[in-house]
Image (cartoon, helix red, strand yellow):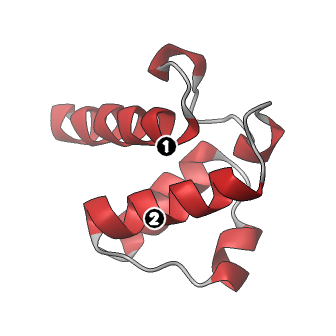
Amino acid sequence: MQGRIDMIDNFIALLANALEKKPSTIAMNDEFRNYKEWDSLAVLAVIAMIKQNFNITIPRKDFDELKTVSDLFEYIQAHR
């Protein structure tokens, strides 16, 4: 269980960095597209962060279907 918590904490830190937010302002049940920092550059930054850190390329069609931070995390876990 601690391993999963560490993975979530690491993911949130990476996501926060990509979005230029504080990790403490991100929750797993947040709809990331509702963040005030969310724009077309944020989309590219998050997709690039996932590619760089997890070696996963998310097709834009799949990415557009993800709603929450948790959805994004679970997608990465399923495709590792």
Residue 57: where, in percent of width, then height? 44, 80
- Label 1: few (<14), some (14–19) or many (≥20) C-alpha neighbours in 10 Å: some
| Contact? badges 2 and 1 (CB < 8 Å) | yes
Q: Residue at x 56, y 25 (%)?
A: 21
Rounded to the nearest angstrom, the CA distance separating label 2 from label 1 is 9 Å
Q: Quadrant of the C terminus?
A: bottom left
Residue 48: where, in percent of width, then height? 45, 64
Q: Quadrant of residue 17?
A: top left
Q: Nearer the viewer, residue 49 or 65?
A: 49
Q: Residue at x 39, y 72 (%)?
A: 78
Q: Residue at x 36, y 64 (%)?
A: 77
Earlier in the chain: of badge 2 and badge 1, it is 1
Mark number displayed over residue 51: none
Residue under pointer 1:
18
Q: Quadrant of residue 19?
A: top right
Mark number displayed over residue 48: 2
Dot 1: element: helix
Q: Residue at x 59, y 84 (%)?
A: 59
Q: Quadrant of residue 30?
A: top right
